[in-house]
Image (cartoon, helix red, strand yellow):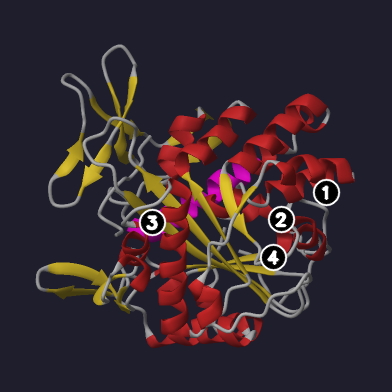
Amino acid sequence: MQVERGQRRPGTDVTTPRKRRRDPLWARLTVIFGAVLMMLSGTAIVGARVVIGNATSSIETTNLLGGAAAAAGQPGGNNIKGAVNLLLVGIDARPKGSSETSVLADTIVVLHIPASHDQAYLVSIPRDWRVQIPAYPKTGYGGSTEKINSAFSYGYQGNGTELEKRARGVDSLAQTIHTLTGIKFNGAAIIDFAGFESVVKTLGGVNMCVDERAESIHLGIDKKGKIYKLWYKEGVGIQDLPPGAKPVVHEKGCRRMSAELALDYARIRKSLSDGDYGRQRHQQQLIKAIAKEATSKGVITNPLKLNDVIKAAGKAFVLDTQGIPVEDFIFTLRGVAANDLVLIKTNAGKFNTQKVNGQEFEQLSDESLQMLAAVRDGRLASFVISNPQFIAKT
């Protein structure tokens, strides 16, 4: 199995109504938001406030949007009315002891829920999108034209605690997206992959099917089967691979995967024929596998294990609800069922690459920009009905 670690980054048919099921919301989410909404799964399964209390008590909350909320004129309050947009950021912190210590914004997703609060859309933002990143005075950054994932890095740099630096990173990224699209965010969540891995580990692994041979740049393995965590330096290659070890390779076929291998496969991009779009597909596959595992009899009929899974999810991420109690988020959005989730493919899943000064960037098509405008204006449902090619089939 492979995972991609890399460069400095510093379906359902919506026209056909379906009977709603009480499946967990995150059953079809991508890897970043799976852990966030695991709380909802516990609530749906158990239906008790004590579960919500246990889950939310372990959630670390802080103001991740900061200046982004102010710049967007985002109102505060203790309820959620109208459409909801959440910025979801997955980060790739270097393994402890590695030769590089920077933190990368590996996944950027906008979760859009319309005013009806009965459907959810996931819109992935390409990490390599070439954009004008606005200045970020908190770190002295003056602004530049680069890949959008660099916006997180420019907020992260400088002094402060790890949480403070990560919060600045999300804030800088949110301000960049708002400047480009006009999208206002009601909240944000950030998760590192080590945290998400702990959730899958608590479940005892998942069943996955590899649809394309993939070679890892994040994990290595030696002749004795010992696995090593690696990282990838753009233009240089895999770093920290011990002598005698080789990159992990995920061969085609179905098998039981450990948390380490499942997450690795879901993060691979470079060795896939369709790159980042394939990675999004595999991330969705992983969340489905987690959903099946989490709702199996071995979990839902075992209160102790269920509680452990929920607690692991709560510790895996940092959440910003802009002052709205986490319980209010859960109950307000509880109408969003798994079958209502729609995964949106930026650029309709097709590459739109541009080379500038020898470096490759991804550009958003006019249709993709119209799609983001639909997110901003709360009319994304109408857009995808008219543009079904943007819906990721599963």
- Residue 32 seen in this snapshot: yes
Left or right of 65? Residue 274 is left
Position above or below: 224 against 358: above
Task: Check disc 1 and report the residue beneath it.
Answer: 44
Q: Main secondary structure of the magenta part?
A: helix
Q: Magenta span has 279? A: yes
Q: SS at mark 3? A: strand
Q: Which residues are magenta?
A: 274-290
**Amino acid on which disc 3 is placed:** Ala
Residue 105 image label: 3
Task: Check disc 2 and report the residue beneath it.
Answer: 25
Q: Residues within 10 Å of mark 4 (few under 14, many from 20)?
A: some
For marks 3 and 2, give the CA distance: 24 Å
Q: Earlier in the sequence, mark 4 or mark 2?
A: 2
Q: Residue at image x 44%, y 72%?
A: 346
**Amino acid on which disc 2 is placed:** Leu
Closer to the camera, 90 or 363?
A: 90
**Amino acid on which disc 4 is placed:** Gly
For marks 4 and 2, give the CA distance: 22 Å
Q: Magenta span has 258? A: no
| Pointer 4 with pointer 2, Cβ within 8 A | no
**Amino acid on which disc 1 is placed:** Ala
